[in-house]
Amino acid sequence: MASTFSVEKARAQFPALAKNQIFGDNAGGSQVLGTVAKSSISEYLVNNNVQLGASYKTSKISTETFDKAYKVAADYVNADVGEIVIAPSTTQAFRNLAAALKLKAGDEVILSEVDHESNIDPWLHYATLAGATVKWWAPSDHSNPKLDVATLRNLLTPKTRFVACTHASNILGSIHDIKAFADVVHEVPGALLCVDGVAYAPHRAIDVKEIGADFYAFSWYKVYGPHISLLYGSFKAQEQLQSLGHYFNPSGTLMDKLELAAASYELTQAVIPLVAYFGDNPKQTWAEIAQHEEVLQKHLLEFLKSRPDVSIRGDVSPAASTRVPTVSFTVKGKSSQSVVEGVEAQSIAGIRWGHFFSKRLAEKILGLGEDGVVRVSLVHYNTVLQSLLPAKIYCKNRLPDPHTKYTGFQQIHNPNRKWPNQVLTKPPVWLSTDLRDGNQSLINPLTIEQKWEYFQMLVEIGYTEIEVCFPAASQVEFDFTRRLIETPNIVPDTVRLRGLSPTREDFLARTVAALRGAKRASVCTYICVSDKQLKYQGFTRERALEQAVRSVRYLRSITKDDPESAAVTDWTMAFGLESYNEADHDYAVQITEAVREAWEPTEEDPLVVVLATSTEVATPNVFADQVETFRASLSDPEKISISIHTHNDRGCGVAAAELGMLAGADMVEGCLFGNGERAGNVDLVTLALNLYSRGIHPGLDFSKLYDIKRKYEKLTGLIVSQRMSYTGEFALQAFSGSHQNIIRKGIAQRVEAAEKGIRPIWDIPYLPLDPEDLGIPLDTIIRVNSQSGKAAATWILNRRWGLDIPVELQINFGGRVQMMCEALAREISHQEVINLFIANYALTPSEKHDSASNIGNISVTSDGTLQTVVGMINPADSFAIRIDGTGPDIASAVVRGLHFMKDVNAAAKIHHTQRLSGRFDGKYCVLATCVEGDKTTWGYFIDENEGIAQAMAVVSASLHMYRRKLSTLPLKKQNTMAKMAASSATQTAATA
């Protein structure tokens, strides 16, 4: 690992973490390192999986690797190789150790009531057999159950032989001071301390010499490795053990004494790459891991402590010195099982409930039943978000009653509203605020070069009003605007550049300086008009009105009233009523009238007043009433152009804009694809294409919509939603079989009409407009998954080959397509559909299927009454096929002439003959069936000669019937029939 811990880099080392899951059950077993699972274990099994200790080369390599793993494992815990044994599990290691410990009557054994049962039951069992006395070591504080030295000292006597405890609780995460325990235990001559380190080892380095334990065990599978364990026993402690091995076992090491058979070779050698994960400086690595884990448990514990219905079990301190990030809790009035299942039902998080084999701790100390606790156990590869998510998902409140916190919106009185009866007949003036509202909301605002490219895209689309800057915000805004103006032929004469500024004279001066020299320019200055915003800004209505008028007069003096400036630039002004939708109507009109008098607009050069739903708070009809009432209240409405600036906080930005247009708005401001603060500004693409789909040209060009989307995504770093109207990947696509069917039929009828010179109105169900108008090929609109039906398959064959398959084959093939999707559990591509058609109905999928000459020689002749088909074909995946038959039609001639069909009582029929387009342009495609009883098989063939195509299609259908029949017979009969068919073909070829 790197010297500075990175959770992202750590996660990349664990293949399982790439799954869509949040793993919070690490105390039950961590995820496995990729170097361990993918390379180390598999490499060993493939190349070195032999018995150890032999003299041949592979065995030597295997033995050396095994011995090296033991040495690495011993070094990892700062022990001698002779002091460790690798076992299948910690539970098994403790059981073997208990069997080897020579307890006798009168010995005293001290067991902890907070331990996992694997560190209790073996000692209890063998102590009982030996007649030894068992004493129980219990925590004095049940609210934060931790073992302490004082209680231990009171239990110790000269007869104490053995003490067992845990390093960290597998439920509570509490860390015990093992060194202090060891010092006290060793005050009794011969007394031994055995420590369960399973819950501690995934979080901290282990130095058995430093902590002083006589025995120490942990599981590698909880430390990012395979399902094995390590047990340490000091040489001194081993003197009190008897060997469990064979009579000739030398018993000089812990392995000799306790390992009844050699540890798993492949799992043991995996310790080598596992330990390597902690790097050249493992002490630093573990310190950084502890630091990260402290952050994890801090966030989780703080959240749980904020919940009055949650009881944290154990230490509530997040300090890494006192606990590891295994956190358990209970929820008032809820079973732990229901809490966990609730999390699972609502998320991808994996956590657990229960007592986790620390049943004595859960029941006796914590006072819990079998249901136990909810446990969230984290390790260093978990993120802060993951640490919180499982608890937050379940512990989140139901939505509180909103009536004490929120109020309804005061609707404006407009009993004679006219807008509901209006109809949109023309587009508004469009103003793009992508380079301002859109840009300010990006995580990384656009650079000058990115703005430059974006501006050119807006011009190409057709925008003539473009808000390009807020010069007071940054130097980039100013410099970009100057570059636009000073670079020849970049800003078309038809385009007006707008700069945005608050009502402050210094900011206005800066904005005018940025726009100076432009052919057409506009300054939009704004002020908040809602009472709540005025309140939080410390303004009164009177002060805001005074500032607005003063600022407008100043702006006028440096723009249209400045002869030098006015001679170069056609200046206009827009005045923005920030949060107009939340303002008092009369005050909004009052301030507008005052601004109008200060600016003195004309009908030819009106004042633009921007009515902004800066935060959307009401339904779109309320905004429409506001717009209509506002216009009706103006004393000189002809000299004012109303622009609406809607946001999408409630998801109604487009609807509000459209109703606002019905209510009399002249201009609409917004961004491509709904970019903008919070939930975004109104999406100008959707608005424009809504008009276009109703026969009103918006004056904007989205004929290359996907190119525009790709450029937008590249420049902004945002991703357009797959479900975005018109633009999203799925917006003009169909998965549903019923939708696909009617789309296919509708487009087929349009094609027929076009061939007759008719251009009907677009009325295809499920497609609000023609995708090709937006540069989207029709071929892409049908997608194929398990919900698709025969329509999708039929569509693809028609678009690729120009083939129209009959209904019976549509049903047959549609079923196969659906089965493939279900088997793969995914969408399948158009090419996969084509390949499936070839595999199921072609004569020979492994050969070209568009010419008989590719696989043999065949002739079709007629004497006017009878058809004769003669030839030999050699499909690559079949025996040679001889045809020599005569009949009233080609189908019957082929069936009579096929040697292998003599065992099949079937009839063939040619169903469909068609000249193809596309890849097989001009060739004939013939579809045929072969029927035996209630069984039908299909076949097809493509050839330049219609008669040969018909004959070969019948051969294909017949061969599929033969193979189907063959598959139903016993294997012996299959072999006999296949040999007879092949022999017949060979004899015929020899005679020929």
Image (spheres, helix red, strand yellow):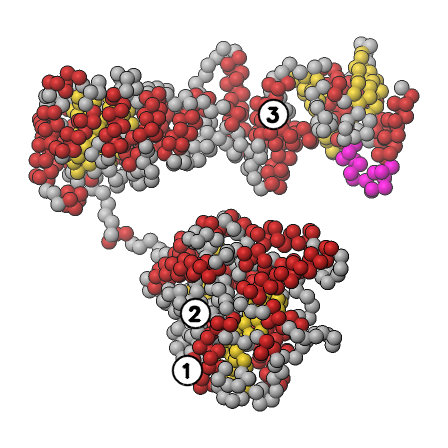
Whether 173 is drawn above or below 553: the answer is below
Q: Main secondary structure of the magenta part?
A: helix
Q: Residue at x 42, y 75 (%)?
A: 146
Residue 813, horizontal then vertical, whole percent? 64, 31
Secondary structure category for the residue under label 3: helix
Residue 304, horizontal then vertical, whole percent? 36, 62
The residue identified by callout 3 is 797
Residue 522, horizontal then vertical, whole percent? 20, 24
Dot 2 and dot 1 residues touching (CB under 8 Å): no
The residue identified by callout 1 is 150
Q: Image quarter for residue 523? A: top left
Cα separation, mark 2 vs mark 1, equals 17 Å
Query: What numbered label is drawn on residue 170?
Result: none
Q: Which of the two discs, 1 and 3, labels the residue nearer the N terminus?
A: 1
Q: Residue at x 31, y 36 (%)?
A: 445
811 relative to 583 in the view: left or right? right
Amino acid identity at mark 2: Ser
Amino acid identity at mark 3: Leu
201 relative to 679 in the view: left or right? right
Q: Residue at x 32, y 26 (%)?
A: 452
Comparing labels 3 and 2, the label whose residue is closer to the camera: 2
In depth, the one of 806 and 794 nearer the eye is: 794
940 relative to 589 in the view: left or right? right
Amino acid identity at mark 1: Ala
In depth, the one of 369 and 745 nearer the eye is: 369
The residue identified by callout 2 is 174
Q: How many marks?
A: 3
Which span is picked out in magenta?
A: 962-976
Residue 845, horizontal then vertical, whole percent? 71, 29
Tell whether position 963 is magenta: yes
